[in-house]
Image (cartoon, helix red, strand yellow):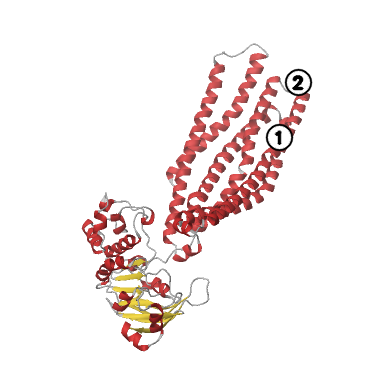
Amino acid sequence: MHQPYKKRMALAFLGMIVTAATEPLVAYIFKVLLDHGFVEKPTFPLWLVPVAVVGAFVARGASTFLTTYMMNWVSTRVLNTLRRQMFNRMLLVSIDFHASHSVGQVINSIMFEVQQIIEMITKLFTSIVRCSLTVLGLLAYMLYISWTLTIVAFVLMPLMMLVVRLTAKRLKKLNKDSLAVNAELTQVIEETTRAQQVVKIFGGEDYERSRFEQRADNLRSYSMRLTSTFAATVPVTQIMTACAMSVMIMMALIQASHNQITIGGFISFFTAMIALLAPLKQLAEVNGPLQRGMAAAEAVFTLIDSPVERSGGKQLAERALGKVDFQDVCFAYPKQDKLALNNISLSVAPGETIAFVGMSGGGKSTLVNLIPGFYAVTSGKILLDDENINDISLISLRRQIAMVSQHVVLFNDTIAANIAYGDAAPDRERVEAAAKAAYLTEMIAGLPEGMETQIGDNGSRLSGGQRQRLAMARAIYKDAPILILDEATSALDTESERAVQAALDQLMLGRTTFVIAHRLSTIERASRIVVLSAGSIVEVGTHQELLAKQGAYANLYYLQFSKEAPVELI
């Protein structure tokens, strides 16, 4: 634990000790007042009474404030630390993690489940430590007044612990299931918010409403089960306490009749016993947050302990030439036996443009995702400038690559920030040059704040073509020697495509470019076209060469292009 944490935790602990000490102190003041103030003539100055009473409560208030403040100081920083660790791990995990964990699950873990852990820590430390100290102090004072009466109070503790133990197992399971349902509800809200256009155009309102209501009802059901299980603990504890109090009052009356206890001693004992109820109740209630925290901790530390992408590797000293070689590359997705890619061998010269075509599921996207190291090859190897990419640091490798896909990802920031994304010290001239090369100048000029215009969530304030060109401007700004275009113009209409094609030509110039299922104009301009089927290369050649072969590519071509020349090759 860091030194500032230790000091503040020590201060919080000191506050708890003082708070606990004031409980028996108040009971003792009542004993002195009754035995030496009411039963007989006061033997102390009367001004001491308000000083003692007010002083005790001032000390209690100050110590309670000190404990609360210091615990909150520590807990909020622990919360931020955990969230930073989770967010940093989320940035470092492999693509496969995001394939197996929904957005809702990740958001739920970082925002809500980690909060449950902090509440558990706060409740555990504050309630258990402070209440335990209070209970010990009051019990010690009660032993001092009457050990026989205190024995009855000791009977209460093991009985209460038995009740807590019986409910703990059920509470933990219910909390774990509740957190899972909460993550599902978060996922529904996130998906529905993100997919508003799809929901509206396909009439999915009733379906989404049904999904939401089902999960909301499930969450409410778990909440009610938790409440009923947890709430039953408190009255049972109170009933046991009431039984103990009844027995103690009877015994006190018997002792008083034999002059074994004074009226002041009995009232003081009874005051201490009443004061004992609150900390005992809090100790009983700590089980709920404890089990919620334990269930949440599993999800939080599953994320924190998730395996990260490989680290280390050689740092490339300069800009790569862009020569890429695939040597007998085989790949299977994690937990799958079937190969998605089988014996892929291909040599790509610097500056060459390679177009991958084929039916859906042929392995085009899988193959290009291996180049930036999103996945590691199962066997074989991929070389960059004759260097195995597994021996190159992922950060250094990815500096050599720019990517534009059909699923454009933009950030809720300015146009300039999106173009220079990833650059800690953006060059304004390069930003403007990239925007101009992507034919964004006219659009930007029409905006009230120009380059500093906020584009909304994932560029929601821009048209599809503008978003695509902004993604291209980002790739132009990066100026990487290797370019991956994953159906980058599929969202564009014919007019927008013509506006972007010149930018694409400029972007591809002098770069090793991998193109997936581009339109006819890009396919024809490719240095070579690689036809993939079921994870294997079936044909390689130029557009004219493959048409002349009358093979797989020709079949695709004639299947996809009619006399009116439809522009998409799937």
Q: In the drawing, does residue 407 fall left or right of residue 260?
A: left
Amino acid marked by disc 1:
Thr
| Helix, strand or loop under label 1 | helix
Q: Position of residue 104 (x, y in %)?
A: 50, 56
Q: Which of the two marks, 2 or 1, is nearer to us in this view?
A: 1
Q: Residue at x 35, y 54 (%)?
A: 461
Toward the front, the furthest residue is: 563
Q: Residue at x 78, y 21 (%)?
A: 257
Q: In the drawing, does residue 260 fall left or right of residue 424?
A: right
| Residue 299 visible in the displayed image | yes
The image quarter containing residue 45 is: top right
Q: CA distance from mark 2 to mark 1?
A: 26 Å
Q: Which residue is mark 1?
A: 241
In the displayed structure, 291 sits above or below 364; it is above
Q: Residue at x 55, y 16 (%)?
A: 48
Question: Which of the pair 503/209 is nearer the observer?
Answer: 209
Q: Position of residue 525 (x, y in %)?
A: 29, 77
Q: Position of residue 309 (x, y in %)?
A: 43, 65
| Helix, strand or loop under label 2 | loop
In the displayed structure, 519 sits above or below 182; it is below
Q: In the drawing, does residue 53 fall left or right of residue 239?
A: left
Q: Could you say which disc has been placed on residue 13 in the image? A: none
Q: How many marks?
A: 2
Toward the bottom, the furthest residue is: 549
Amino acid marked by disc 2:
Asn
Q: Residue at x 57, y 32 (%)?
A: 20
Question: Which of the pair 311/105 is nearer the observer?
Answer: 105
Q: Which residue is mark 2?
A: 259
| Residue 136 visible in the displayed image | no
